[in-house]
Amino acid sequence: MQNLNLKDKNLYYIGGIVRDEILNKESFDYDITYVGNAIEFCKNLEKNNIGKILQINEPFGTVRMLINNKEVDIASTRDEIYPEKGHLPVVSDIGCELKKDVLRRDFTINAMAKSTLTNEIIDYTNGLEDIKNKTLRVLHDNSFIDDPTRILRGLKFSVRFGFSLDNHTKKLQDTYLENINRDMSYKRLKKELIETFNLNKQKAFDLFFEQKIYKLLSEKELKKPEYNIENLVKTYPVKHVWLVYIGWIISDNFSQNLHQNLPLNLPQNIPLTKDEKKIIDDYRTLMDANIDSDNYSIYKNFENKATEAILLYTIMSGKDYGLKYFKIKDIKVKINGNDLKNIGISPSKKYSDCFDYILKNKLKNPDMTKTEELELAKHFFK
Ligand code: CTP
């Protein structure tokens, strides 16, 4: 952890950053908590030229500051209550004692604080012991009911650190997964799905099925596709790795809702960006298409499809057409409309038939030169 040279008896590093330091791992977020009013405290820091306030979130009592060129979040200690289970909590008791702030958190390994003044680790819930034993333990029995995204966080930490759920936590998870409250924040769930599956670890996918965590996304029983997705993604890197793992489940939900004439924005649908929607649409188009095994049919069906969708198709169809496409995708017809005009062929709808005709031939003979393409064009229009 980079030393921020911030020392105050009421100021503590908290959560992931303390966990990561104990585990000797790099931490990206700097979460700091102030026992009392963090906004006043930060205004004072700014007055004394110790840092610059970037943003204040008054109702949450949090401040984002730039200190030693590092963005840090300084939060007032607070409690949280979940009037709507599965949704964002409501902040209460800003400035409460440290223990209360700690006890609202997800796992004991994330519930430690480190004093900025004495470097003492404050460990009310035996987090250190659980780190030693590689154990993930929730702090209370309602943890998953309050916030089911914690089930995915547990999966993420299991894979990231090689930890396992303690027996009681596993029972609480099983009980929740048998009785899911579908009215939850799917936006929050999505964030954790991305963080979990973007790790590109097959192990995460295995546990997702073994522990039936997939039920958070599907009301149906699902079977894990037998494919090593981790290796596939290593060979064909993509941006939206998480969709290569679970895009088919999201797609199923969409189809089901379409089928039942339900609106597409039902809560059980993960909210998707435009790029993510295109991946799901492309995947569905590929699964519905009649693709022949010849290179031309493969090329035409896969052209302009998102790589994530092609990988999803490969996993779910059991066919290697997509992988064949990756080998031929760079074969392109070199001549264009101007070249055709220059040899005296006036523009018409037949231009595109001509380019297809050349492509068909070029896929058989990829070394074809531009002159040979022009010869083929003349032959086509003869
Ligand atoms: N937290 C929680 N419940 C959640 C999300 C977060 O109790 N659903 C608490 C945990 O104490 C966590 C802290 O808020 O340590 C900060 O959350 P976040 O930044 O999402 O996680 P980190 O633990 O910092 O993990 P990462 O390294 O993945 O950022």
Image (spheres, rainbow, N blue to C red):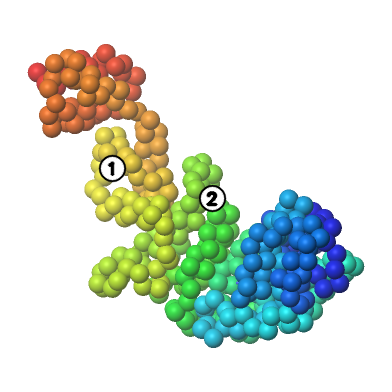
* Residue 177 appears anywhere in the view: no
Above or below — where is 334 with respect to 41?
above
Queried on whether the Cβ of the residue with tag 2 lies below 8 angstroms from ligand 1, the answer reads no
Q: From the image, which quarter does the C terminus lie in?
A: top left
Above or below — where is 212 with respect to 306?
below
The residue closer to the viewer here, 104 or 325, is: 104
Q: In front: mark 2 or mark 1?
A: 1
Q: Secondary structure at mark 2?
A: helix
- Name which residue lies at 21% across and 30% down: 356
- Name which residue lies at 64% across and 83% down: 92
Q: Where is residue 337 drawn, in percent x and y?
A: 22, 24
- Name which residue lies at 79% across and 57% down: 49
Q: Is 27 on the left or on the right of 352, as rendered?
A: right
Q: Which residue in the structure is indicated by mark 2?
A: 230
Q: From the image, which quarter does the N terminus lie in?
A: bottom right
Q: Is 313 on the left or on the right of 290, as rendered?
A: right
- Neighbour tally class for label 2: few under 14, some 14-19, many 20 plus, Cα within 10 Å: many
* Residue 224 appears anywhere in the view: yes
Q: Which residue in the structure is indicated by mark 1?
A: 301
Q: Where is residue 123 drawn, in percent x and y?
A: 81, 75
- Name which residue lies at 53% across and 59% down: 194
Q: Is 327 on the left or on the right of 88, as rendered?
A: left
Q: Where is residue 367 drawn, in percent x and y?
A: 34, 19
Q: Residue furthest front?
A: 47
In the image, which disc is placed on residue 358? Answer: none
Q: Secondary structure at mark 1?
A: helix
Q: Amino acid at mark 2?
A: Glu
The residue closer to the viewer here, 174 or 335, is: 335
Queried on whether the Cβ of the residue with tag 1 lies below 8 angstroms from ligand 1, the answer reads no
Whole-angstrom CA distance, mark 2 to mark 1, is 25 Å
